[in-house]
Amino acid sequence: MTTERLDLVAGTLALAEAELAGDGGFAALLGVVVPPSWPPGEYDRTAIEYLRDRMREGGEACAGWYSWYAIERATGTLVAAGGYFGPPVDGVVEIGYSVLPEVQRRGIATEMARALVTRAFAHPLVRTVRAHTYDTNPASIRVLERCGFARRGPGESPGAVEFRIERPS
């Protein structure tokens, strides 16, 4: 996927394994600069392992339904990670995203989230895209609101808030 400033590359099992190995193979496979501050935010080792394991289980059928890497086209630098928590279930997918601290407040999360929503709604089975965040994270709330999400109420974990956007008619 491409956006105005980003190239979004779907995660693969090979990329996840290289990322976890931490030996420089990840940057070489992606062909990008990976800043020392990688990985961003909640996209930590536990999240990477979770996504890797889901890709192992799902095989080719799950391609594009887990991690995506955001590369800033102008610099060739990896700036964010995001994606889905899996293929659609009962017409619903959930997105998540994390942006490196040094590029926050530049609209990258919004650009990435919009691309993920657009891609999800291009799939005929997706009717709803949801996301979870916390009231203590106003920047994430602003990203979701800019993308057209509406607050739905409490999320699944303590203190979380669920946001949703429905397929346009």
Image (cartoon, grey):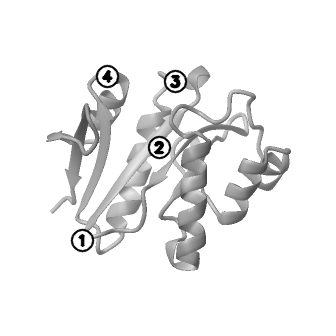
| Residue in the image at 37% along x and 62% along y | 120
At label 2, counting other C-alpha atoms closer than 10 Å, the crowd grade (few under 14, some 14-19, many 20 or more) is many
Element class at badge 2: helix
Element class at badge 3: loop
Q: CA distance from mark 1 to mark 2?
A: 24 Å
Q: Mark 3 is on which residue type?
A: Gln
User: In terms of sequence position, does the residue under pointer 1 or pointer 2 come before the other?
Assistant: 1
List the residue tagged with mark 1.
90
Q: Are marks 1 and 2 in contact (CB under 8 Å)?
A: no
| Residue in the image at 41% along x and 36% along y | 110
Q: Is residue 139 left or right of residue 20?
A: left
Viewer-proximal residue among 62 and 7:
62
Q: Are marks 3 and 4 in contact (CB under 8 Å)?
A: no
| Residue in the image at 67% along x and 33% along y | 38
Task: Mark 2 vs mark 4: give the one in front.
Answer: 4
Q: Position of residue 140 (x, y in %)?
A: 36, 30
Task: Mark 3 vs mark 4: give the one in front.
Answer: 4
Report if residue 7 is visible in the image: no
